[in-house]
Protein backbone atom coordinates (compact mmCIF):
# COMPACT_ATOMS: atom_id res chain seq x y z
CA UNK A 1 0.00 0.00 0.00
CA UNK A 2 1.02 3.64 -0.35
CA UNK A 3 1.35 4.24 3.39
CA UNK A 4 3.56 1.17 3.82
CA UNK A 5 5.84 2.36 0.99
CA UNK A 6 6.13 5.84 2.51
CA UNK A 7 6.89 4.27 5.88
CA UNK A 8 9.64 2.07 4.45
CA UNK A 9 11.16 4.99 2.53
CA UNK A 10 11.20 7.31 5.54
CA UNK A 11 12.64 4.58 7.77
CA UNK A 12 15.42 4.10 5.23
CA UNK A 13 16.14 7.84 5.22
CA UNK A 14 16.11 8.11 9.02
CA UNK A 15 18.11 4.99 9.78
CA UNK A 16 20.55 5.59 6.90
CA UNK A 17 23.29 3.06 6.59
CA UNK A 18 22.92 2.06 10.22
CA UNK A 19 23.34 -1.70 10.55
CA UNK A 20 22.87 -1.82 14.31
CA UNK A 21 19.13 -2.53 14.75
CA UNK A 22 19.11 -1.04 18.26
CA UNK A 23 20.61 2.28 17.12
CA UNK A 24 18.33 2.32 14.05
CA UNK A 25 15.29 1.93 16.35
CA UNK A 26 16.66 4.62 18.67
CA UNK A 27 17.08 6.99 15.73
CA UNK A 28 13.43 6.51 14.72
CA UNK A 29 12.25 6.95 18.31
CA UNK A 30 14.40 10.07 18.70
CA UNK A 31 12.95 11.61 15.55
CA UNK A 32 9.41 10.84 16.75
CA UNK A 33 10.17 12.42 20.13
CA UNK A 34 11.73 15.54 18.60
CA UNK A 35 8.90 15.86 16.04
CA UNK A 36 6.27 15.72 18.81
CA UNK A 37 8.12 18.22 21.01
CA UNK A 38 8.70 20.53 18.03
CA UNK A 39 5.06 20.47 16.94
CA UNK A 40 3.97 21.20 20.52
CA UNK A 41 6.45 24.11 20.68
CA UNK A 42 5.24 25.82 17.53
CA UNK A 43 7.93 24.26 15.30
CA UNK A 44 10.78 25.87 17.26
CA UNK A 45 13.98 24.26 18.47
CA UNK A 46 13.41 22.03 21.51
CA UNK A 47 15.67 20.73 24.26
CA UNK A 48 16.79 17.17 23.58
CA UNK A 49 19.00 14.58 25.15
CA UNK A 50 22.13 14.33 23.01
CA UNK A 51 22.21 10.55 22.70
CA UNK A 52 24.18 8.62 20.09
CA UNK A 53 20.96 8.47 18.06
CA UNK A 54 20.46 12.26 18.18
CA UNK A 55 24.08 12.92 17.23
CA UNK A 56 23.82 10.44 14.34
CA UNK A 57 20.60 12.10 13.14
CA UNK A 58 22.35 15.50 13.22
CA UNK A 59 25.24 14.12 11.16
CA UNK A 60 22.70 12.83 8.62
CA UNK A 61 20.86 16.21 8.58
CA UNK A 62 17.67 14.53 9.78
CA UNK A 63 17.85 16.75 12.88
CA UNK A 64 19.22 20.26 12.86
CA UNK A 65 19.91 22.82 15.54
CA UNK A 66 22.49 23.84 18.11
CA UNK A 67 24.39 20.78 19.32
CA UNK A 68 26.20 22.54 22.20
CA UNK A 69 22.92 23.57 23.82
CA UNK A 70 21.07 20.38 22.73
CA UNK A 71 18.39 22.44 20.97
CA UNK A 72 17.09 20.55 17.94
CA UNK A 73 14.28 20.17 15.44
CA UNK A 74 13.72 17.94 12.41
CA UNK A 75 15.71 19.10 9.39
CA UNK A 76 12.65 19.35 7.16
CA UNK A 77 8.87 19.60 7.64
CA UNK A 78 8.36 16.25 5.91
CA UNK A 79 10.50 14.61 8.61
CA UNK A 80 8.36 16.25 11.29
CA UNK A 81 5.24 14.96 9.56
CA UNK A 82 6.69 11.48 9.23
CA UNK A 83 7.65 11.40 12.92
CA UNK A 84 4.13 12.45 13.90
CA UNK A 85 2.59 9.90 11.52
CA UNK A 86 4.76 7.15 13.02
CA UNK A 87 3.59 8.17 16.48
CA UNK A 88 -0.11 7.97 15.53
CA UNK A 89 0.52 4.67 13.76
CA UNK A 90 2.30 3.30 16.84
CA UNK A 91 -0.63 4.31 19.05
CA UNK A 92 -3.01 2.63 16.60
CA UNK A 93 -0.94 -0.59 16.62
CA UNK A 94 -1.02 -0.57 20.42
CA UNK A 95 -4.80 -0.19 20.20
CA UNK A 96 -5.05 -3.10 17.75
CA UNK A 97 -2.98 -5.33 20.04
CA UNK A 98 -5.26 -4.40 22.99
CA UNK A 99 -2.33 -2.82 24.82
CA UNK A 100 -4.48 0.32 25.14
CA UNK A 101 -8.18 1.01 24.68
CA UNK A 102 -9.80 3.52 22.34
CA UNK A 103 -10.18 6.23 24.99
CA UNK A 104 -6.48 5.96 25.87
CA UNK A 105 -5.60 6.09 22.15
CA UNK A 106 -7.24 9.52 21.95
CA UNK A 107 -5.57 10.66 25.19
CA UNK A 108 -2.20 9.90 23.55
CA UNK A 109 -2.86 11.91 20.37
CA UNK A 110 -1.29 15.36 20.64
CA UNK A 111 -3.76 18.21 20.31
CA UNK A 112 -1.63 20.72 18.38
CA UNK A 113 -2.53 21.59 14.77
CA UNK A 114 0.36 19.69 13.17
CA UNK A 115 -0.50 16.48 15.04
CA UNK A 116 -4.21 16.86 14.30
CA UNK A 117 -3.46 17.30 10.59
CA UNK A 118 -1.39 14.12 10.65
CA UNK A 119 -4.19 12.32 12.52
CA UNK A 120 -6.62 13.36 9.75
CA UNK A 121 -4.16 12.13 7.13
CA UNK A 122 -3.80 8.83 9.01
CA UNK A 123 -7.57 8.34 9.12
CA UNK A 124 -8.02 9.31 5.46
CA UNK A 125 -5.22 6.96 4.34
CA UNK A 126 -6.62 4.04 6.29
CA UNK A 127 -10.12 4.63 4.90
CA UNK A 128 -8.80 4.86 1.34
CA UNK A 129 -6.71 1.72 1.72
CA UNK A 130 -9.72 -0.07 3.25
CA UNK A 131 -7.66 -1.11 6.24
CA UNK A 132 -9.31 -4.11 7.93
CA UNK A 133 -11.80 -3.14 10.64
CA UNK A 134 -10.99 0.56 10.29
CA UNK A 135 -14.67 1.34 9.84
CA UNK A 136 -15.19 -0.15 13.32
CA UNK A 137 -12.46 2.14 14.68
CA UNK A 138 -14.15 5.20 13.16
CA UNK A 139 -17.68 4.25 14.25
CA UNK A 140 -16.57 3.40 17.80
CA UNK A 141 -14.63 6.68 17.90
CA UNK A 142 -17.74 8.61 16.96
CA UNK A 143 -19.64 6.97 19.83
CA UNK A 144 -17.02 7.98 22.43
CA UNK A 145 -17.10 11.16 24.49
CA UNK A 146 -14.25 13.04 22.78
CA UNK A 147 -13.19 16.64 22.49
CA UNK A 148 -15.12 18.27 19.62
CA UNK A 149 -12.07 18.72 17.42
CA UNK A 150 -11.60 14.94 17.20
CA UNK A 151 -15.11 14.61 15.75
CA UNK A 152 -14.27 17.42 13.32
CA UNK A 153 -11.05 15.67 12.32
CA UNK A 154 -12.79 12.31 11.83
CA UNK A 155 -15.62 13.84 9.77
CA UNK A 156 -13.15 15.84 7.68
CA UNK A 157 -11.07 12.72 6.94
CA UNK A 158 -14.20 10.81 5.96
CA UNK A 159 -15.39 13.63 3.69
CA UNK A 160 -12.10 14.04 1.81
CA UNK A 161 -11.31 10.34 1.51
CA UNK A 162 -12.05 8.59 -1.78
CA UNK A 163 -13.95 5.84 0.05
CA UNK A 164 -15.72 8.06 2.58
CA UNK A 165 -19.10 7.27 1.04
CA UNK A 166 -18.85 3.81 2.63
CA UNK A 167 -19.78 5.47 5.93
CA UNK A 168 -23.15 6.68 4.65
Image (cartoon, rainbow, N blue to C red):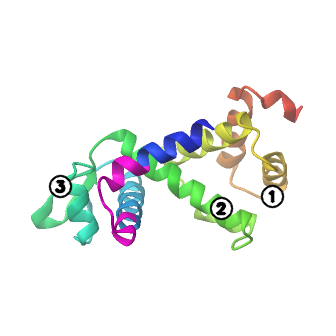
Q: Which mark is residue 59?
A: 3
Residue at the right extreme of this rendering: 168
- On the question of residue 42 being in view, the answer is no
Q: Position of residue 100 (x, y in %)?
A: 70, 71
Q: Nearer the viewer, mark 1 or mark 2?
A: 2
Q: Nearer the viewer, residue 18 or 64?
A: 18
Q: Nearer the viewer, mark 1 or mark 3?
A: 3
Sequence-wise, the earlier of marks 1 and 3 is 3
In the figure, residue 159 lies in which quadrant?
Answer: top right
Q: Position of residue 69 (x, y in %)?
A: 13, 66
Q: Tell me if mark 3 has few (under 14), some (14-19) or many (20+) residues whose alpha carbon lies within 10 angstroms of its own.
A: few
Residue shown at the point (10%, 65%) measured from the top left: 68
Q: Which residue is mark 1?
A: 144
Residue 131 is a magenta residue: no
Q: Is residue 123 left or right of residue 60?
A: right
Spatial CA span between label 2 and label 3: 31 Å
Spatial CA span between label 1 and label 2: 19 Å
Q: Tell me if mark 1 has few (under 14), some (14-19) or many (20+) residues whose alpha carbon lies within 10 angstroms of its own.
A: few
Indicate whether 89 appears above or below 104.
Answer: above
Residue shown at the point (59%, 46%) measured from the top left: 119
Q: Which residue is mark 2?
A: 93
Q: Is residue 96 left or right of residue 46?
A: right
Give the extent of the magenta segment. Answer: 11-24
Indicate whether 163 appears above or below 4.
Answer: above
Amino acid sequence: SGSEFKGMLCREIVTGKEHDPYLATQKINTLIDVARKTSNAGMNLVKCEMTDAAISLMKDDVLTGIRDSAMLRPGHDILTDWGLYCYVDDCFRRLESNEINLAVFYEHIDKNIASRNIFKQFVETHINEEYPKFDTFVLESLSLKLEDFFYDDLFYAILVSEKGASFL
